[in-house]
Amino acid sequence: MRTVNMEDTVKIFKSTRELAHFFALKLAAGIRETPESRFFSLALSGGSTPGVAFEYLASNFREHIDWQKVWLFWGDERCVVPDSYESNFRMAEESLLVHISIPASNIFGIKGEADPVTESERYEAVVRQHIPSKHGIHQFDLMMLGLGQDGHTASIFPENIHLFNSDRLFEATENPYNKQKRITATGKMINQARSVVFLVTGESKAEVVARIIKKKDGWEKLPASLVHPQNGQLLWLLDDRAASLLNL
Ligand code: 6PG
């Protein structure tokens, strides 16, 4: 692993497995350090690399993490039924939840089957009710994020980058390519987190990773470029292929 100290911390791994192991260690440490008096709030992401991290946690950290201390949320969800192959909840359930000992009462899923606007309001209320707030700021302890080739993250696409200026914590939106309705954390929710971790692998992401991290070619129009936790840490976990155009 190589660490590059830039404005944000960028860690580059030879393999997805090494990346997933580093993420698991970071998560386990954060949970261990959480005071007994409260839960550790983890916001999960959809996407292929987060999915690999779930599988790694299920295989290697089942017993190393006290999952009873963890509250699980989602940073975004597709508006589909929970057993749809497109559901982020289903992906997490199959790759992680069924393999760990976590009470159902610790799992706060976004109801993809509900009316998007109504559900975004309900989910925001659930987050406000459960996540501790500091000066009115509700902070997830850790938010996992993936990165799309177009620079989207969570379900904030370039076409709806205004969601970084929303006063809401969650909003209904849509995937502009297939018009699929989505519910997503807004920029306000993301940038309030104590720790935000991007998990990005593969050659196909190299160009967008370089645009964002090296602030090139219209980087400011990419939603993932606007992720800067105001009182928290931003960590990029990349494999060599996704980092290949950083020339580090
Ligand atoms: C989703 C995710 C989305 C994802 C990126 C990267 O619901 O799809 O929240 O933001 O993380 O699209 O996905 P891949 O890693 O599969 O390219």
Image (cartoon, grey):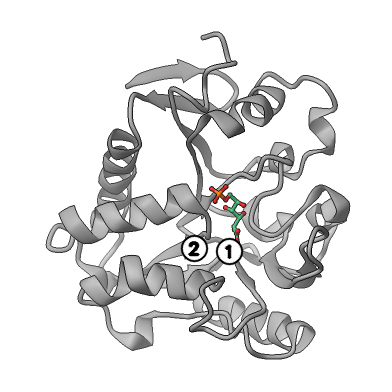
| Picture quadrant of residue 110 | bottom right
- Extreme left residue here? 63
Percent position of residue 100, x then y: 22, 71
Left or right? Give the position of 248 relative to 116: left
Identify whether 127 is placed above or below 47: below
Circle 2: element type = strand
User: Does any atom of ligand 1 lie closer than 8 Å to the CB of label 1?
Assistant: yes
Q: Amino acid at mark 2?
A: Ala
Identify whether 191 is placed above or below 10: below
Percent position of residue 61, x then y: 18, 56
Which residue: 59% across, 26% down?
206
Circle 1: element type = loop
Percent position of residue 231, x then y: 58, 45
Left or right? Give the position of 51 relative to 158: left
Left or right? Give the position of 2 relative to 181: left
Which residue: 85% across, 56% down?
160
Q: What distance separates the C-alpha of mark 1 from that of mark 2? A: 5 Å
Q: Which residue is mark 2?
A: 43
Q: Which residue is mark 1?
A: 75
Q: Residues within 10 Å of mark 1 (few under 14, many from 20)?
A: many
Comparing 13 with 167, the one in front is: 13
| Picture quadrant of residue 154 | bottom right
